Image (tube, rainbow, N blue to C red):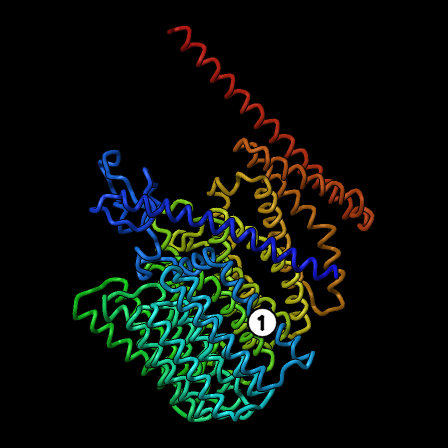
């Protein structure tokens, strides 16, 4: 009883609210009518009249770029932007969709809710056994038709709302047919398919008749979902793709007549989704023909505006790229699965098709963005053909080339949508490249460089170099080019090049002793950083990245002269490795001397950070100490048994002397250059020597060695103190002399 009362109360409230809203709407319509009657006839009315309007509220055609008489201009009009500006002139192709949803979200939700409500009512009636199966289908067809008729009568005054209503009615007809066939078995599959085709045809006719893009989208969804709705589980691909191809041709004609771009994108998505499922489930030669047919259809979709206006808009370019690359990838996959040769035939054919358009633009002497897009696609397809010829990994190569193409198109068109797609695709390229590198673990007997894994990496490296060059040109004179994301992108690209070379090197020398592998890998790393620093200006590596590379270089140098060298000395003593390889190990001195002299000593910016002094000094002390230690071991070791004694002797006797000499150099240099940080480093090092000597070394020496060590250390400390005092006096005399000179000059003045 309570429930019935609440329902009645809700209905009464709805009637009251509707009555109030209706009266207000009528008043507003009367005001609009009065305003339109008072508007001068020579001003076209597209909406409400307003005294002043900001330029952003006008369409691009109604807003002049420079206006010298803004105050004297006639009253501006609020235009309907979607009607005034053709969709072809909108750089953001998502804005019409978002605008439609913002304005009509309630209508969309309403029709969806209505369909659900009718469905729940029918379900309730079925549960109560009120109606039979045939009656259920009849009710569905009747309600769908009634909604379509209602939308038909609303089309004059409420065009968009009418389209949504019609779409809801068409959806009900589709679902009713599906349920009648699959659940109730009221008619055969052929009959169900004919009914769905008739519904699709009806919706296309209505959308064309009412000039409604919303309705044709409903029709398109229904047309592509119809085969799934009436599927019996048996795969009849010939019939399915004949139907889809005919549907795509029909949609192409609609697009040609009405310029509805969204139709081509939706049709492309569904068509290639079906094709992908086909070639994965059952690869056969027949699917190749349908791929080629649909390539021609969607290529024509992409060139509609080009054929009429000789220009490619953002949506057209995206579709053009997707058609070429999806078709190429799928057809190559099919050829590989079926064992046909040559696999490069399709990228060559598609490159020739795009090349014809390049040639057409060239003959017209039209070297605009359209020419660049066709050229980029042609070159990319030819690059794919070359990569396939050398049997590189398909996905990695194609994604890398496509990412570079998107970046190239972004540069030529300056449309941010291609930048977004590039940043979406590039992580996939990185992931595919990592999967490719993982195949080194299972690969056997790969040739040096000329092998599928490294050739795939080489394709990626080439595209990365193009990416870096394109990004450099895109920045132009932009002073904010050193942003965090751009720096991270550069580091990521350089890292990919590094790991590609490193993995190939490690694989080719994997049979060598561990010390050789380790030393070779560290040498490659040091020389790679050295090359980046050497070409820093040409590569536009900024100061932050350069400092990071120098820090990383020093850390790798420390690992190289400590851990790697220890492994190498051990193998040389055991005769596992030739002593001549130690000369290869010493090659690190070439980049080390360059980096230390040119990038540390002669670069004031690097030394502005205090940690730079300490890391540089620590690396230098470690390098000098370790190399003298290695030479001592190689010159005196006979076998592995006397190695521990030599190590202990060097550590106790020679190492403190080396550190003491280096500390003097640091102190002297710091005082001479008036650099307190170098002096601190020197005094810290001498402190370490003293602590080491008194805490450990003297207790490990014999009496003669102890006497020699104390005498040498005492002499060094006295010399250090003497130099410190001498430099201090020199500096004091210079300061006093300067003050006296300044005083005399002031007195004379």
Above or below, 182 relative to 402: below
Q: Residue furthest right?
A: 699
Give x and y (percent) for residue 652: 74, 51
Question: Which residue is found at the position 53% from the left and 20% from the top?
Answer: 733
Q: Is residue 736 visible?
A: yes
Quadrant (top left, top right, bottom left, bottom right) of the N terminus: bottom right
Q: Residue furthest left?
A: 364
Question: Left or right: 228 with respect to 331?
Answer: right
Question: Which residue is found at the position 61% from the left and 76% from the top?
Answer: 122
Viewer-closest of 378 and 59: 59
Viewer-closest of 672 and 93: 93
Secondary structure type for disc 1: helix
Q: Is residue 468 visible?
A: no
The residue wearing badge 1 is: 118
Above or below, 8 relative to 45: below
Quadrant (top left, top right, bottom left, bottom right) of the C terminus: top left
Above or below, 619 relative to 406: above
Above or below, 156 relative to 651: below
Crowd around label 1: few <14 · some 14–19 · many ≥20 (10 Å) = some
């Amino acid at each position: 009883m309570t429930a019935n009362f609440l329902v009645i109360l809700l209905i009464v409230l709805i009637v009251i609210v509707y009555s109030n809203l209706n009266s207000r709407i009528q008043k507003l319509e009367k005001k609009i009518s009065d305003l339109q009657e008072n508007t001068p006839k020579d001003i076209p009315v597209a909406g409400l009249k307003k005294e002043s309007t900001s330029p952003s509220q006008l369409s691009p055609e109604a807003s002049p770029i420079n206006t010298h008489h803004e105050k004297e201009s006639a009253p501006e009009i609020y235009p309907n932007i979607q009607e005034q500006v053709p969709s072809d002139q909108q750089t953001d192709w998502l804005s019409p969709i978002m605008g439609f949803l913002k304005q009509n979200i309630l209508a969309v939700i309403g029709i969806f809710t209505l369909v659900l409500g009718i469905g729940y009512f029918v379900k309730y009636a079925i549960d109560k056994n009120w109606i039979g199966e045939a009656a259920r289908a009849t009710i569905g067809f009747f309600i769908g038709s009634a909604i379509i008729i209602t939308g038909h009568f609303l089309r004059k005054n409420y065009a968009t709302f009418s389209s949504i209503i019609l779409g809801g009615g068409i959806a009900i007809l589709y679902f009713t047919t599906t349920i009648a066939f699959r659940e109730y078995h009221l008619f055969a599959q052929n009959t169900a398919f004919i009914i769905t085709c008739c519904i699709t045809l009806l919706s296309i006719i209505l959308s064309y008749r009412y000039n409604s893009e919303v309705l044709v989208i409903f029709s398109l969804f229904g047309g592509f979902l119809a085969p799934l709705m009436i599927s019996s589980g048996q795969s009849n691909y010939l019939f399915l793709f004949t139907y889809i191809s005919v549907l795509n041709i029909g949609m192409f004609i609609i697009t040609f007549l009405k310029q509805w771009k969204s139709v081509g994108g939706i049709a492309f998505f569904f068509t290639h989704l079906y094709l992908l499922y086909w070639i994965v489930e059952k690869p056969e030669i027949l699917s190749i023909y349908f791929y080629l047919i649909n390539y021609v259809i969607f290529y024509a979709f992409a060139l509609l505006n080009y054929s009429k206006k000789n220009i490619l808009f953002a949506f057209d370019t995206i579709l053009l790229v997707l058609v070429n690359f999806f078709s190429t990838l799928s057809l190559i996959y099919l050829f590989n699965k079926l064992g046909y040769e040559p696999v490069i035939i399709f990228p060559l054919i598609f490159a020739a098709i795009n090349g014809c358009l390049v040639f057409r633009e060239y003959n017209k002497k039209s070297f605009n963005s359209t020419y660049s897009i066709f050229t980029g696609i042609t070159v990319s397809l030819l690059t794919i053909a070359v990569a396939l010829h050398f049997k590189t990994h398909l996905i990695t190569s194609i994604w890398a080339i496509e990412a570079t193409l998107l970046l190239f198109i972004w540069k030529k068109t300056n449309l941010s949508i291609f930048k977004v797609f590039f940043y979406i695709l590039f992580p996939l390229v990185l992931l595919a490249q990592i999967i490719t590198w993982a195949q080194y673990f299972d690969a056997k007997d790969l040739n040096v460089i000329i092998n599928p894994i490294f050739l795939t990496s080489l394709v990626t490296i080439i595209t990365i170099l193009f990416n870096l060059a394109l990004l450099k040109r895109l920045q132009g004179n932009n002073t904010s080019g050193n942003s965090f994301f751009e720096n991270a992108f550069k580091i990521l690209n350089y890292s990919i090049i590094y790991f590609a070379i490193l993995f190939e090197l490690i694989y080719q020398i994997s049979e060598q002793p561990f010390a050789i592998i380790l030393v070779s890998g560290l040498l490659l790393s040091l020389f790679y950083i050295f090359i980046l620093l050497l070409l820093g200006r040409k590569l536009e590596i900024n100061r932050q990245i350069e400092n990071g590379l120098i820090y990383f270089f020093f850390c790798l140098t420390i690992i190289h002269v400590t851990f790697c060298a220890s492994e190498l000395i051990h193998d040389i003593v055991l005769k596992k490795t030739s002593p001549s390889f130690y000369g290869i190990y010493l090659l690190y001195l070439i980049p080390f001397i360059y980096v230390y002299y040119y990038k540390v000593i002669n670069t004031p910016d690097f030394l502005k950070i205090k940690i730079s002094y300490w890391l540089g000094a620590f690396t230098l002390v470690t390098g000098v100490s370790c190399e003298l230690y290695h030479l001592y071991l190689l010159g005196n070791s006979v076998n592995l048994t006397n190695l521990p004694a030599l190590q202990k002797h060097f550590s106790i006797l020679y190492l403190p002397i080396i550190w003491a000499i280096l500390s003097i150099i640091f102190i002297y240099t710091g005082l001479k250059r008036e650099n307190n940080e170098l002096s601190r480093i020197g005094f810290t090092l001498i402190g370490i020597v003293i602590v080491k000597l008194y805490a450990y070394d003297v207790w490990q020496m014999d009496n003669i060695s102890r006497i020699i060590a104390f005498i040498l250390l005492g002499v060094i400390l006295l010399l250090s103190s003497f130099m410190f005092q001498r430099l201090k006096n020199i500096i004091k005399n210079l300061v006093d002399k300067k003050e006296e000179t300044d005083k005399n000059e002031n007195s004379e003045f």
